[in-house]
Image (cartoon, coloured by chain):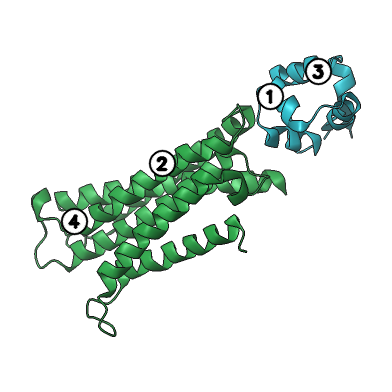
Amino acid sequence: MWSARRVWAVLIVLAVITFIGDLFGPAERCWGVDIGPTAAVLFRLALIGSAVLVGLRPRDVLPETWSLAEGRAWLGLAFMTMILLAFAKLLWNLAQLPEVPVTPSQVPAGHFLRDLVPIYIVWLVTSMLLGRGAGAVELDERDLRMQNRADRVGDWALVGAIAQCILMLVVFPAALLKWWLAPMILAHALIGFLIVRTLVEHAALVAGYAWARR
Amino acid sequence: MTDIIISNQIRALRQARGVTQEQLAAACTVTRQTIIALEAGKYSPSLELAFKLAHALERNLDDVFQYEEKK
């Protein structure tokens, strides 16, 4: 009989593989199977399955040494990574367009939004369900200290990204930056900065907990 | 350079009172993982938490925490 943790690990691996298949799978059919839509359905099922399992048996799934806040930090890191990958794919699709989009309706964001909505809902639900396995205290001073430190790391990452942008604007010729400076592209680049900042914050939080335990 | 070392007797005092980590955590409104980190000497608590721990263990602060300077 498989333990809940092992089943959960399998579901997570399945979710990762199908998510990659959904995003980067070939457009043509393989052995009569349309990879994209099939992977998308399997991805959603694996995602929902993992959330249900965490909700039913949170203490069996996550390591005992993790506080609720640490579990949520890992969850945040995983889901933000998925969001960043989906967003990178959107940027790639934007770069493939023959003309730079001028209005939001011209941006091919349908696939990204179809991924984003279930990811965000499952993230919220799983995060809430995780709380069922916690004690009376969900967040204490140690967690808040960790979060403050991670928050600062996230801020520095954003400052670093903006500084890099300033450098690029100063150093590179305007012709080279023409595509990036189109309003719709620039707006997406800024959204990307915010996604990266949040991802770095979650990564720093997870690293902080691991470092404190060493 | 002087290193400040704060050690504690939380585990010994808790076990002497027959209190579980979970119960002590609830009494101090922290998570069990914070009690684990404190007992392992991997976390220095705030003054407020230090007093809460001493109160929960019915000891003076000096009985629970020891302050040491190493040169």
At label 2, counting other C-alpha atoms closer than 10 Å, the crowd grade (few under 14, some 14-19, many 20 or more) is some
At label 3, counting other C-alpha atoms closer than 10 Å, the crowd grade (few under 14, some 14-19, many 20 or more) is some
Q: Kindly identify the amino acid type of the residue bearing the numbered disc 3.
A: Ala
Q: Kindly identify the amino acid type of the residue bearing the numbered disc 4.
A: Gly
Cα separation, mark 1 vs mark 3, equals 14 Å
Kindly identify which residue carries mark 4.
A110
Image position of A180 (left or right of A17): left
Are labels 4 and 3 on one chain?
no
Q: Which chain is green?
A: A
Kindly identify which residue carries mark 2.
A125
The answer for which chain carries disc 1 is: B
Q: Which chain is cyan?
A: B
Cα separation, mark 1 vs mark 4, equals 47 Å
Q: Is residue B58 shown above or below A81? A: above
Q: Secondary structure at mark 1?
A: helix
Which circle, 1 or 3, is nearer the viewer? 1
Say how many tags the image has. 4
- Answer with mark 1 or mark 3, whichever residue precedes in sequence: 1
Q: Kindly identify the amino acid type of the residue bearing the numbered disc 2.
A: Val
Residue B26 badge: 1
Image position, residue A26 (x, y; %): 27, 77
Q: Secondary structure at mark 3?
A: helix
